[in-house]
């Protein structure tokens, strides 16, 4: 009888003792302190967001210590923290419930990391979900990160949450209810996750791209359907991170690194592990200040319908308006190279007599604006580039390319180094008359994409004006492009920006139906930029960056400048 009473009492005694700090701390496995400090020093040489970061996703392989440091360093610029929640897999299947936690402290090479006993107590109140466990004594998903916590967030208590591989989406949703009240403005949520496992590099890259497409779209259902560990070693950790960030902070991920263990090894291996470092910022922070942590790759921005003429012309020629408007654009792009859909014809002198729907732009002003925005390529695959006939079109191409701006006609595949851009238009002119459904299967021959390893993005002029969502034809074309190895399909023409990026075929590719307007004299239109980060291994991450109506912004600036 006494034994039964002791067995019932001891767990509660242990928890109370942990709360009082009398339990012996777990000893974190020995690491090379110099390796950790060097990784942190390397990260500190890079920029970081100065606005609050609500969450990060980092590896737990110290082979990639530099990536762990990059994630933690990005979260140090937004003010003091009072709690760090760490979501980790239960690698060795030691938990007997769906989740495990502990109130105990941890002793690291850089000092002690305290446990958050009061927060842990609230989790353990759900005995059907959580248990207090000794598994953290050997759980590298937690222990590999704690030296970084001790070094960069000294004294901040942690709430470890180990997630069983046998847990279900229903379990994750129940845990979400318990974790939400613990996530305050001073909480950092750390997701300890390694991505594609035990795959050859070529297949790992494919799985990484599917994961990156899911992160770009924010599609929780697509995440739940992914494979573990082919895509990642903890679907539950990624699920809880994304749901907490969305529900508590309204934050979305920025992927700042995607690498593979092969990158760190000299010898070719058949079984690799991938790493995807995510930083979570709110949309307001993204809009006002670039929320970046030195992405490990090349960044491009795609912009929608652009007409540097007509009613916009006097505003664009106004020097104070130009200065302020360019500053507004650069606050989003950070000066990264841009690709825009140039609607109309660039000419030396605007003709006095022209058709009412013909779109035209003056040469000098257009070149100046494109260069000042760092536009490196323009798509002329649209329904207005031939408004003045083939001779005027060729003169425009010569003028733009003489200024160092690539011109993409229908069907062109331009090698931009890190990225290839495939320009297509579903509209055209035949004998002066416009026609639709221009893109045919013969225009999408896969052989045209062979020979270069960089990923392909299709920039397509399509759809119906006024629509922000695709129709049946656009969905069909996006799927055809996916079958031809296109990583992302980016649309223009409708003058209304889409609100989200969508998965194609369960994440094999992705589509943004419409960027809407960029610099275009249409008050009813809406606009967005698409940020495309290309990583060294050939994967891409995209992020939608909503824009205000820049035509309205410019008009307001002109009034203020008078």
Image (cartoon, helix red, strand yellow):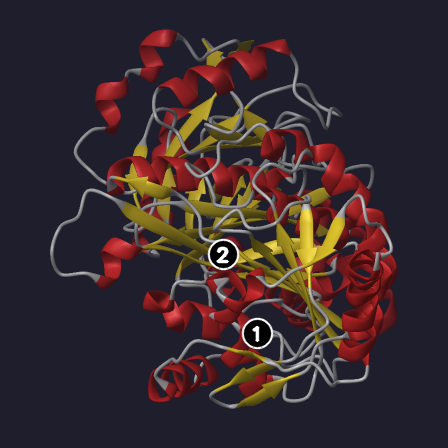
Q: Give me the residue at 50% from left, 70% from top.
A: 143
Nearer to the camera, 52 or 412: 52
Q: Is residue 439 above or below residue 62?
A: above
Q: Is residue 456 left or right of residue 168?
A: left
Q: Please state the horizontal and vertical placement of residue 264, each as a whole percent of the image.
A: 24, 63
Q: Viewer-nearest of labels 1 and 2?
A: 1
Q: Residues within 10 Å of mark 1 (few under 14, many from 20)?
A: many
Q: Quadrant of residue 205?
A: top left
* SS class, disc 2: helix
Nearer-the-camera pick, 522 or 179? 179
Residue 180, given in percent of the width and then of the height, sits at: 84, 56
Q: Quadrant of the N terminus?
A: bottom right
Q: Residue at x 19, y 61 (%)?
A: 265
For residue 391, what is the image quadrant?
A: top left
Q: Which residue is mark 1?
A: 74
Residue at the extreme left: 267
Q: 196 left or right of 418? A: right
Placement of the C terminus among the 4 image quadrants:
bottom right
- Total number of numbered discs in the rendering: 2
Q: CA distance from mark 1 to mark 2?
A: 32 Å
Q: Is residue 526 above or below residue 178?
A: above
Q: What residue is disc 2 on?
A: 370
In terms of depth relative to the viewer, which is nearer, 130 or 195? 130
Is 163 on the left-hand or right-hand side of 117? left
Q: Residue at x 72, y 52 (%)?
A: 547
Secondary structure category for the residue under label 1 = helix
443 lies above or below 66: above
- Can residue 61 be spotted in the picture? yes
CB atoms of marks 1 and 2 within 8 Å? no
């Amino acid at each position: 009888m006494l034994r039964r009473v002791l067995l019932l009492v001891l767990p509660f005694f242990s928890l109370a003792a942990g709360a009082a700090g009398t339990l012996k701390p777990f000893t974190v496995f020995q690491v090379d302190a110099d390796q950790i400090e060097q990784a942190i020093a390397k990260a500190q040489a890079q920029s970081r967001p100065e606005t609050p970061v609500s969450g990060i996703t980092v590896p737990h392989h110290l082979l990639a210590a530099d990536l762990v440091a990059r994630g933690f360093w990005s979260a140090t610029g937004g003010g003091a923290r009072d709690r760090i929640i760490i979501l980790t897999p239960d690698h060795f299947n030691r938990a007997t419930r769906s989740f495990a936690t502990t109130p105990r402290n941890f002793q690291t090479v850089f000092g002690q990391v305290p446990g958050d006993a009061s927060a842990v107590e609230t989790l353990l109140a759900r005995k059907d979900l959580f248990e207090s466990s000794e598994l953290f004594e050997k759980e590298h998903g937690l222990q590999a990160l704690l030296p970084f916590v001790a070094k960069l967030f000294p004294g901040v208590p942690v709430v470890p949450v180990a997630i069983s591989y046998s847990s279900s989406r229903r379990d994750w949703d129940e845990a979400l209810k318990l974790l939400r009240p613990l996530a305050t403005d001073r909480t950092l949520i750390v997701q300890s996750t390694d991505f594609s496992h035990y795959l050859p590099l070529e297949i790992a890259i494919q799985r990484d791209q599917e994961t990156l497409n899911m992160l770009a779209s924010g599609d929780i259902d697509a995440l739940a359907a992914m494979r573990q560990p082919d895509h990642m070693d903890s679907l539950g950790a990624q699920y809880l991170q994304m749901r907490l960030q969305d529900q508590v902070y309204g934050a979305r991920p920025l992927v700042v690194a995607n690498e593979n263990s092969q990158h760190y090894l000299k010898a070719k291996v058949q079984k690799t592990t991938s790493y995807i470092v995510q930083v979570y910022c709110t949309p307001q922070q993204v809009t006002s200040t670039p929320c970046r942590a030195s992405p490990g790759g090349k960044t491009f921005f795609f912009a929608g319908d652009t007409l540097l003429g007509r009613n916009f012309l006097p505003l664009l020629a106004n020097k104070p308006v130009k200065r302020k408007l360019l500053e507004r654009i650069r606050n989003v792009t950070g000066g990264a190279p841009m690709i825009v859909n140039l609607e109309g014809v660039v000419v030396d002198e605007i003709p006095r007599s022209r058709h009412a729907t013909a779109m035209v732009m003056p040469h000098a002003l257009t070149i100046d604006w494109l260069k000042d925005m760092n536009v490196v390529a323009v798509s002329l695959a649209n329904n207005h580039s031939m408004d003045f006939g083939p001779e005027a079109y060729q003169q425009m191409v010569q003028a733009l390319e003489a200024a160092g701006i690539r011109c993409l006609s229908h069907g062109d595949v331009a090698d931009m180094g890190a990225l290839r851009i495939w320009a297509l238009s579903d509209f055209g002119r035949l004998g002066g008359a416009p026609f639709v459904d221009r893109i045919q299967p013969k225009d999408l021959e896969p052989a045209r994409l062979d020979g270069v390893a960089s990923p392909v993005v299709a920039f397509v002029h399509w759809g119906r004006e006024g629509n922000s969502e695709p129709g049946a034809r656009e969905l069909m074309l996006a799927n055809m492009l996916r079958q031809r190895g296109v990583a992302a399909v980016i649309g223009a023409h409708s003058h209304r920006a889409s609100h989200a990026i969508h998965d194609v075929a369960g994440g094999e590719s992705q589509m943004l139906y419409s960027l809407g307007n960029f610099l275009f004299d249409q008050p009813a239109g809406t606009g967005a930029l698409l940020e495309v980060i290309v990583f060294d291994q050939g994967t891409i991450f995209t992020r939608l960056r909503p824009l205000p109506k820049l035509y309205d912004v410019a008009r307001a600036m002109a009034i203020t400048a008078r």
